[in-house]
Image: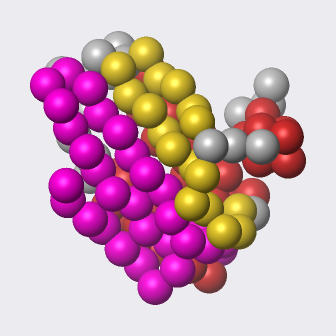
Amino acid sequence: MAGREDRGASFTEGRDGDSLVLRFEGEWTTPQVALADKALRGLETRGVKKAELDLSSIELLDTTGAWLVARCRLALEAAGAEVAVSGSDAARDALLAKVLHQ
């Protein structure tokens, strides 16, 4: 597993064939996400058929953090992956829906 980290926002990437699991950790808030944002932008999505975004270890999530998670989801879907979100709760689901305008 490769790790990518900013002082408060980080994620780990696990791959198994054409499956990808991203585990988001820490504080996904405006002051904490700069390096994680850069790493997410560089994520290789080619060949991914199934992806899981695991949010269970996110301690804090604001609109900026939610947008980065949503953008990651949209990029994976645009690359043809089936994306599932796990470890969320009603508040996080509502925030993700808001930034996606759903």
Q: Quarter of the image holding residue 18?
A: top left
Q: Is residue 39 magenta?
A: no
Percent x, y for residue 12? 33, 57
Nearest the viewer among 48 and 54 is: 54
| Residue at x 67%, y 52% (from the top left corner) | 66
Percent x, y for residue 2? 20, 59
| Residue at x 50%, y 34% (from the top left corner) | 73
For the record, the magenta segment spans 1-30
Q: Is residue 31 above or below residue 45?
A: below
Q: Is residue 53 above or below residue 35?
A: above
| Residue at x 80%, y 25% (from the top left corner) | 102
Residue 22 seen: yes
- Residue furthest to the left: 17
- Horizontally, residue 99 falls left or right of residue 78, namely right
Q: Is residue 26 magenta?
A: yes
Mostly what secondary structure, the magenta segment? strand
Q: Is residue 14 above or below residue 8?
A: above
Quarter of the image with the N terminus is bottom left
| Residue at x 62%, y 82% (from the top left corner) | 31
Percent x, y for residue 6? 42, 78
Q: Quarter of the image holding residue 62?
A: bottom right
Residue 71 seen: no
- Horizontally, residue 88 falls left or right of residue 95, namely left
Percent x, y for residue 98? 82, 39
- Horizontally, residue 45 falls left or right of residue 72, namely left
